[in-house]
Image (spheres, rainbow, N blue to C red):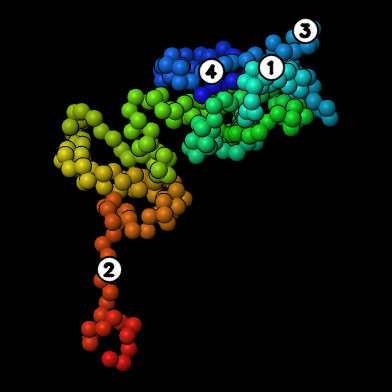
Amino acid sequence: MNFHVLTLFPEMILEGCSASILARAAQKDLIRVDAVNIRDFTQNKHNRVDDYTYGGGAGMLMQAQPVYDAYKAVSERIGKPVRVVYMTPAGVTFTQDKAAELASEEDLILLCGHYEGIDERVLEEIVTDEISIGDYVLTGGELPALVVIDAISRLIPGVLNNTDSAETDSFQNGLLEYPQYSRPEIWRDKAVPEVLLSGDHTRVEQWRLAASLKKTRERRPELYEAYMKEHPDLDPETGGRRKKKRKKRSACNQPSDVVNC
Ligand code: ADE
């Protein structure tokens, strides 16, 4: 996956990708992060990329020309149609499903705004997707772009060492992740749940599912309801299948809806 980030602060993007799993993924050529400085494309003799907004109001707006020319240079280099994702609090909320959808692209352009935003005309011209990382306003799109790069990258095969860990994550199956424990067995008088030491794989899986369901019901009831609707046979208390209720029979040993026996 090639991420092309259009930004006024390329160092923020490169720094953010220079450690831990993203750095290793780049080293292994599983991802490439190209930070393109929008300022390099300004035609203003003072290198300015922003100006006052028509109609008045506080703050400065990024102008259309340098953003468009930066986009043109990158898209010509890519040489085929590419999605352009504008990071904005007015976008659709970023989710695990959106990350999975974007992970199937070969190239992505991420556009980061600053100041009061970007001239609407260039957004209309080039943007295919608008993404918000939550209902709060940041000083620019760079941190949201890093969030998106991180969430997508860890879904790319080979980026995580243990492929399992992406599959069992919170949200990957629509539930929050169950609690996990490591050594020692007892820490400050707190013991690891006994079932996890049992070696019984089925019991462990059922315990984990029940624990996921409990946490999800408490913290994200809407996700819990959606999951239970999809899995009507599931017993949320045990993480196993519900025991089938036997049909009541009437005194004459017929199903109760048979009358006149
Ligand atoms: N730019 C500023 N705030 C943002 C947010 N919450 N999400 C995406 N981009 C942003």
Q: Disc 3 marks which residue?
A: 46
Q: Nearer the viewer, mark 4 or mark 2?
A: 4
SS state under label 1: helix
> Does mark 3's beta carbon lie closer than 8 Å to ligand 1?
no
Reading the image, the residue beneath label 2 is: 245
Image depth: mark 1 or mark 3 in front = 1
Mark 1 or 3, nearer chain start: 3
Of residue 124 and residue 146, the one placed in the foreground of this image is 124
For the point 19% across and 28% down, which residue is it? 184
Residue highlighted by disc 1:
73
Farthest-out residue, right: 55
Find residue 226 and report its horizontal and vertical position in percent: 45, 52
What kind of element bears circle 2? loop
**Quadrant housing residue 243:** bottom left
Question: Please, which residue is most extreme toward the front here?
Answer: 79
Q: Which residue is mark 4?
A: 33
